[in-house]
Amino acid sequence: MSPILTITDLHKSFGDLEVLKGIDMTMQKGDVVSLIGSSGSGKTTLLRCVNLLEDFERGSIELDGEAIGYRHDGGERRRLSERHIARQRAMTGMAFQQFNLFPHMTAIRNVMLGLTKTKKMAKDEAYAIAEKWLERVGMIERRDHFPGPPPPRAIAMNPRIMLFDEVTSALDPELVKEVLAVVRDLADDGMTMLLVTHEMRFARDVSSKVVFMHHGRIHEEGPPEQIFGAPETDRLRGFLANSEM
Amino acid sequence: MNFSLFLTELWNARMNLLAGLGDTVLISVASVLLGTFLGVFVGLAMTYGNKPTRFGVRLYIDFLRGTPVFVLILACFYILSVVGLDLSAFQAGVLALTMFCSSHVGEIVRGALKAIPSGQTEAAKSIGLTFGQTFAYVLLPQALRQILPTWVNTATEIVKASTLLSIIGVVELLLATQQVISRTYLSLEFYLFVGFVYFILNFLIEQAGRAVERRISIP
């Protein structure tokens, strides 16, 4: 089976600061990969590169065999057109740390916007899909309310891969449980997911693979039992000792 | 104060005053509409333009905002005719007020767009919206809510500034009133009256603005 996501030698700098120093990673369909590591290790930047919210200078990202963001034109690397990139962005779904919900739209309209504008669906079809997802995450009764808890805006787009950027860090404990339950439910459903998380217990329970990043590189990776049970490097041991389990 | 005499003269002058009021409304509506249209582009250029564009537009805004409207009106009327652009007093006045309005609206639009968190644009991008769609469905609706109260304020400023057109001979409400006064000598009565009419005009604009604000507010 060919991988759904292939990241090869990914480099990304902000000015003089190199944040990603050559990342290689592959994910198969249905994989749930957790990115862990201290702040500034490059986890979120990696996620944002996959969603093309950041440009990257070197390396490539392939989604379902399609190179995203750039094309090579006789040895020259060129950024794809804005329209092309917009289409590729919709192939991945991003759940943001601050959610970034559209405050002027009701919960269901938040979910419908991408369906009607990007996927060009008819209103009633989009409404039905949005309703289905609100139902699934237990928000159906808040359908016509202005967003409080995060509606499933990204997931309803039926992306090839879902990206979660520390979605639980801005929530109160009650909602954390609910959101994690939804993520777990999606994992059981076979959704391919790449998540940045500080919830180590959750990462251990839900992931098929855990990747520990440090200073812009993948420092150690493996199945959760190995990463949490038998960490090989001192750095990872130190990180885990300081994290809440 | 001779009240019955005032009423008689007011009735006699009704056609002239109504024509003046009509001109005031026409000047204000035209300036606000044209100025807002232009101002949105000024604001967009300030927010998304490249450096030279932003510099040019900044200069435009600062120059217009730093110049008295009165001077602007005189400039449009006298200077433009020198360079061969022959505008009527009415046209010159509307041009001056339009430019004045556009600089204010430009600044309001820039501020409103800037106040929207960058996460909104990112979230819109991330569900695959293009720049145009992001602007139309995500940024503009949020910016409009910010813009409205200040925009209504600008509209009332324009109504008040329209009185300055009397100086270049546009017979708007103030000049029409002054003509009546010079015939009747009832200066106190008619100035009080015209002040009240301007108050009513602006009061109506503000009430309409508030009503719209209530309708579109985010709970």
Image (cartoon, coloured by chain):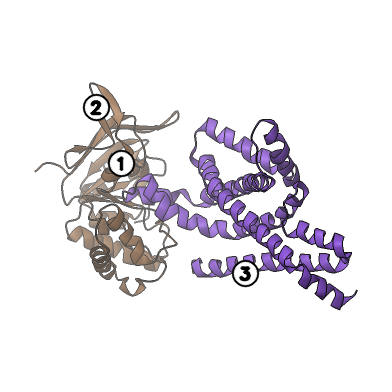
Chain colours: A brown, B purple
A152 displayed left or right of B25: left
Look at the numbered disc 1 and give the secondary structure of its residue.
helix
Extreme residue toward the left, this view: A1
Q: Amino acid at mark 3?
A: Gln
Marks 3/1 same chain = no
Is B157 in front, or is A245?
A: B157
B121 displayed left or right of A69: right
Marks 3,2: beta carbons within 8 A: no
Q: How many marks?
A: 3
Q: Chain of mark 1?
A: A
- Residue A242 at least partly seen: no
B74 displayed left or right of A54: right
Q: Nearer the viewer, mark 3 or mark 2?
A: 3
- Residue A180 at least partly seen: yes
Extreme residue toward the bottom, this view: B4
Disc 3 to disc 1, C-alpha distance: 43 Å
- Residue B82 lies, in percent from the top left, at 70, 31
Q: Residue drawn 30% across and 37% down?
A: A219
Q: Is residue A48 above or below residue B199?
A: above
The mark that comes first in sequence, 2 or 1, is 2
Look at the numbered disc 2 and give the secondary structure of its residue.
strand
Which residue carries the number 3 mark? B207
Is B131 in front, or is A214?
A: B131
- Residue A94 lies, in percent from the top left, at 32, 51
- Residue A62 lies, in percent from the top left, at 21, 38
Is A155 in front, or is B115?
A: B115
Which residue carries the number 1 mark? A83
Extreme residue toward the top, this view: A75
Disc 3 to disc 2, C-alpha distance: 59 Å
Alpha-carbon neighbours of circle 2 within 10 Å: few (<14), some, or many (≥20)? few
Which residue carries the number 2 mark? A72
